[in-house]
Image: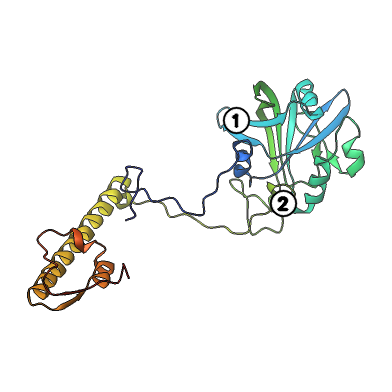
Amino acid sequence: MSESTFGSPLSSVPSDELQAIDVASATRLLSGGVVALVTSTWRGESNVIPISWHTPLSSSPPLVGVSLEQSRYSTDILSHAGEFVINIPPKELANHVGYLGSLSGEDVNKFEATQLETFSGRRVAAPLISDCCAWIECEIVERIQTGDHLFFVGLILSAQAHSTIHDGSSFLPKSETTPLHFLGGNNYSTLRESFVARAPRASDAPEEILQSMLEEDLELSREVREKKEEEFGKLAKELEKGNVIDTKTLESELGIDIGTIDNLDLSKGTVLDDRNS
């Protein structure tokens, strides 16, 4: 087990490949989730903005949250509309997503600019984008100022998804159409692999695993100590006989400074040591 300065026998020494991340950019480490095209309607005008800062909040009641920078036009529209739709785009809309992110709804009608087709929702006035693969209609129940962003808490009123990409509980990675994931900048991805994690058995209880690891570690330490004692005994006998010993090789094999061993008289025998040569 690796030596550690963190006080836990399970800790390891940090990798040399670690790099410091500017705290202002640390949120980008959370990138990788599905992209959301958030639509809203106010005073007869519809708007859409691509975001990656969204999250589930509660199952009962069903709540989700979306976070928008306060200075954005879309933030003002959402505040007045009181409702929104989370549209989940597939890979085929990647270029549209990038383009929509470069536009401001204050200067141009984004739906006219992109010619995206829409259909009516079940519970809200905001449009649902036809070429997306899933839709979540929400009513805003709370607004929270979080630094330079405004966090909208949405109560889910209705949700739909294409049966070819969702089985009712999760997305289907092998489907030809999968949700678009945002990685940062202009980089995107899609689900490529699906696997099932093994559920822990009773024998896999954390405390039992820990005990097993500690026992293995103690056994290994005992074996190493016994081996060293055996080698020290042989070394002492060789010195008593006046034979030649190579301290550099022995120290490399045993992982210890032979000069620090008590009751080992190095004045006897012939010592080979080229460390100071």
Q: Residue furthest front?
A: 277
Amino acid identity at mark 1: Pro
Task: Give the SS element for disc 2.
Answer: strand
Q: Between residues 92 and 157, which one lies in front from this camera angle?
A: 92
Q: Is residue 86 left or right of residue 116?
A: left
Q: Is residue 74 above or below residue 240?
A: above
- Which badge, 2 or 1, comes first in the chain's sequence? 1
SS type, badge 1: loop
- Mark 2, residue position: 187
Nearer to us of marks 2 and 1 is 2
Give yes or no for contact between labels 2 and 1 (Cβ–Cβ under 8 Å). no
What is the spatial separation of the Cα atoms under label 2 and label 1, in whole angstroms?
31 Å
- Residue visible at 63% across and 44% down in the picture: 31
Q: In the displayed structure, does residue 95 sit left or right of residue 260?
A: right
Regarding residue 273, the answer to whether it shows in the image is yes
User: Residue drawn 85% across and 38% down?
Assistant: 103
Mark linked to residue 62? 1
Quarter where residue 34 is shown: top right
Q: Nearer the viewer, residue 29 or 235?
A: 235
Q: Which residue is at a point 91% across and 41% down the rendered structure image?
A: 113
* The N terminus - image quarter: bottom left
Quadrant of the image containing the C terminus: bottom left
